[in-house]
Image (cartoon, coloured by chain):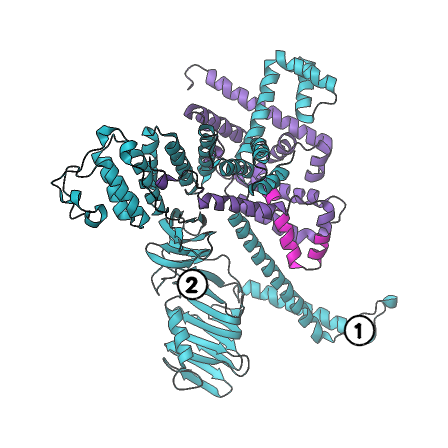
Amino acid sequence: MRRADPACFEAEDQLALGAPSEEAARRVEIHLRHCARCRTRSEVVSSVASAVVEAAGPPLDELTRARIAARLQAEMDAAASRLARSKNALSEAIAPAGGFTPRIAGLGFSRWDRRGLTAAAALIVAVLGAYLLSLRLGADAPRTLLTPYVTAGTAARGGSAYASLGQGLERLQVSAGGLVRASIGDQGRVTLLGPALLEVRRVSAQEIVLELSAGTLVGEWEHGRGVDLRVLSRGLSATIVGTRFLIRCPESGDATVAVAEGIVAVESRGGRSRVGAGAASDRLAMSEEDARALAAEASALGPPVGARPAGIVVLAGTPQGAEVRAGGSTIGPAPIAAVLAAGHAELEASATGFVPAIKEVEVRPGAVATVGFALEPLPAIPPPAPAPVPFESLRPKASARPLAPAHPLASAHPLASASPEARPAEGPPLSAEALYREAEAALRDGDRPAARERLELILRWYPSDSSVEPALYDLARIAYEEGDTSKAQDAVERLLARGHDVAMREAASYLRCRLVLGQTEDGRWLAEVVACFRDFRRDFPASTHDPEVLLLLATAWARAGRCDTARPLLDEYLDRYRDLEGAATAQQWKERCGP
Amino acid sequence: MNAALVMPGVPFGPLRAWVELLSSSLEMTALSPPTSEDEALPLIDRALRGDRRAFDEIYRRYADEVHRRVSRLVGPDPEREDLVQQVFIDVFRGLSRFRRESAFSTWLYRIVVNVSYEHLRRRQRRPAEVVALELVERADDRATPEEAARRREELLRGLALLERLDPRKRIAFVLRSVEGLSLEEIGAIVGAKAPAVGQRVKHAQRELAAMIEREEKRNRRPGAPS
């Protein structure tokens, strides 16, 4: 028993605190050989410690890092704004009290100073009392009720998804050319077109007062809840009972109001007036510019309540500016944050000269999901082979079936006549080699459908022919280029299951790893990438892809925090491929991993 | 086989692109290794003068390190991202209180530990959460399904045991047995004397071993599931 054996105490101490000397370490080592209980304890500690390391997960990816940075930025902005407000409030509170300056020297205050101090103290007490009273009576509600939100690009009024972007604010500021949309509680929403500044001045059970100091405000306010919206701006106070309106506060001159629906009561230097639909406070009919802004925002203002649950998907990757589509509708260029209805969604990223990629994502209500993509450039069409290799010399004679003389395709040029309509319903009219040559020519011409058709005929008509392997590979390539990864995967697996040709197996194995690379980057992804490239290296040690694969393998391990595994691979790369451009990358990772 | 179509020797562009992507992300982190104190202090001075870019730089330099440490302290928790954010908010708010009596990294580590400790306490009060199991298979060797399952089970068991430890002991255990810090270093971070830290580590190890013993005894009982 541990309690009876002092050596167990020593072992426990060493496990927790470390060995004080080599001799002590040796003593405990000998003890552990004989004491099963201490050995178990040591193993438990070691296994839990390695579980901690292993379960810690991959390092921060760039998207997460950027997302945290953005949230921190917002937090710092809010803190700076709070600080500025509290400073202003303090200076305003002190200024009316007489502008006194306490004389530090001698610690004496003049009579006027004392009066000032007394007045300031009285004011502070009065303000504090009023504040406490207002708290007690619940006179004003918190003013943080402007909640920025985003909508889907196709959102229509009363319809599509929208998602809140966090906590309410009491101040929105937009720089030139910028735009922010926010809901006002659950009764209205506004769009602020920059440069603009909008602040919440007062919130009570009867009225919400906003102040627009600059810029253009397009708003929508729902009628019938007993709460009015009042917007103060330069030389103007507009009371909105329930309507769609626009208030423009120019750099100079008084603000104006234009109304698209309902009526707005306006109080300005010119007196009181009521502005109806289609009119403006300074003219009978609203300007074209105001009408355009109102019309543009009408389709973008999201419903504040009763909206379909939605989440935000941040899509970013390479190349930048790739067009992103969801459910058949274009969202915009990447990187982009899209609001999508909750549930399963398929996002397609495409760019000229790249293979489109489809990413599947589960959108959770109110949650932010990030999806990365790296579109792969379309490979160059292979140059036409100068002299096609005669297939008869490469294939067994049995497979080289002659053309059926009676068939119309047999006497004509393969591509000129081999339209799907002309093809017979059954029976192999062309040899595998001829079909392959046609597929080859079609690929050179960029006609993938025709190539695929002929390659599939090879599989159907000549399943045991040796052309099946290149046909499968080409089918995989075509599917891969068309973004059909499952079809590509299927062709690659079929090829690897039957492939005897080493070069073909190498190409297919490489393509398989490429397909894994293109998959969703979830937790298993890294393991699969690593396993695939490791197997590739084992099976094809002399491959021309080895430098890339080795570097990918090493950096993948390093990124996963497994420097112990990454280090020898990086060393191997630096030893074997020190002249390649990847050597600098390998060296950087090596330094990062440490000795 | 027709070599014209297969081109096994021609490297694919995207793979190269991925290497470049890795390289570029490396460059970002390679420029910002865990910073020495000499390099951190001017940044802190600038941040204290209200230079927002200095704080951005502090975040950029230390984000990885903070994330790694938080991850080890709280495990594969879905709220890790929020915790990293909280750490930097605390740094931002408390930078003026950093007196330079200790290294900046120690001060930062202290905040990491405090944030993690509070989170572990809150988590203990909540019902057990599902651990993000997919992480467990992240870097698996994929040798055989049996081996993968066994490793997964070991990992889960290790995490489950840790979850039952008191947060103070858990933190002491991780800092000592995983991070390899000395008792004095841990004491400076958690605000305790070295002997007290030693006791926490010992208790943590003792409790972990006892939990295993209890589990094994239960499994040895007749009728217990094998």
Disc assigned to residue B222 = none
Left or right of A493? Residue B81 is right
Question: Which residue carries the number 1 mark?
Answer: A113
The extreme top residue here reads A34
On the image, the x and y values in percent for residue A139 come to 53, 67
Q: Nearer the viewer, residue A371 or A144?
A: A371
| Amino acid on which the number 2 mark rests in the picture | Asp
Name the chain under label 1: A
Residues shaded magenta: B42-67
Location of residue A304 with respect to A557 vertically, above or below: below
> Residue A448 colored magenta?
no
Q: Residue sitting at 58 percent across and 21 percent down?
A: A43
Residue at disc 1, secondary structure: helix
Residue at disc 2, secondary structure: loop
| Amino acid on which the number 1 mark rests in the picture | Asp
The extreme front residue here reads A387
Q: Nearer the viewer, residue A491 or A145?
A: A491
Q: Nearer the viewer, residue A141 or A337?
A: A337
Is the residue marked by circle 2 packed among few (<14), some (14-19), or many (20+) residues within 10 Å? some
Q: Nearer the viewer, mark 1 or mark 2?
A: 2
> Residue B59 colored magenta?
yes
Left or right of A46? Residue A11 is right
Counting residues from the start of the chain, the first of labels 1 and 2 encountered is 1
Quarter of the image with the N terminus of chain A is top right
Please identify the dominant SS of the magenta region: helix
Q: Residue sitting at 54 percent across and 46 percent down?
A: B81
Location of residue A423 with respect to B182 vertically, above or below: below
